[in-house]
Amino acid sequence: MKKIIMTAVAFFIGIAFSLILAHGTLSAQGANSDSDVLSRLNDIAKSQEELKAAVNSIKEDLQIIKIRITQMQ
């Protein structure tokens, strides 16, 4: 059970990371000025913060699941 959960978490983190990378490289290709680049970098930073919050939320959920499974045994 633990391996399945960890695999699922790793899968979702990989997908999120690849989307962030794809968004960043695609956005940077069309940049015309420094302000556009900075704006897009700020967007990427916001996305990374959101991803960090999501990962932390998943960690908390996994900790709760771990406690419940331990109590059931």
Image (cartoon, helix red, strand yellow):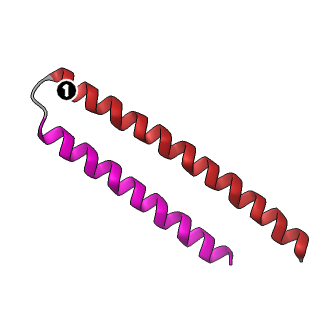
Are there few (<14), some (14-19), or many (20+) residues within 10 Å of tag 1? some
Q: Would residue 35 be found to the left or right of residue 72 on screen?
A: left
Q: Residue at x 39, y 54 (%)?
A: 17
Is 18 above or below relative to 3?
Answer: above
> Per the image, is 54 magenta?
no
Question: Which element carries disc 1, helix, strand or loop?
Answer: helix
Q: Residue at x 85, y 70 (%)?
A: 70
**Residue 47 occupies which quadrant of the picture?**
top left
Is 30 above or below relative to 59?
Answer: above
Q: Residue at x 9, y 28 (%)?
A: 32
User: Quick one: quadrant of the N terminus?
Assistant: bottom right
> Per the image, is 25 magenta?
yes
The number of callouts visible is: 1
User: Quick one: quadrant of the C terminus?
Assistant: bottom right
Identified by mark 1, the residue type is: Asp
User: Looking at the magenta stretch, what is its main secondary structure?
Assistant: helix
Is 30 above or below relative to 37?
Answer: below
Q: Which residue is mark 1?
A: 36
Q: Would residue 7 be found to the left or right of residue 35 on screen?
A: right
Query: Residue pushed farthest top?
Result: 35
Where does the image place residue 54, in percent across and percent down from the top left? Answer: 55, 48
Where does the image place residue 36, in percent across and percent down from the top left? Answer: 19, 26
Q: Would residue 10 be found to the left or right of residue 30 on screen?
A: right
Is 52 above or below relative to 71?
Answer: above
Q: Residue at x 77, y 65 (%)?
A: 66
Q: Would residue 46 be found to the left or right of residue 65 on screen?
A: left
Where does the image place residue 18, in percent across and percent down from the top left? Answer: 34, 56
Q: Which residues are magenta?
A: 1-30
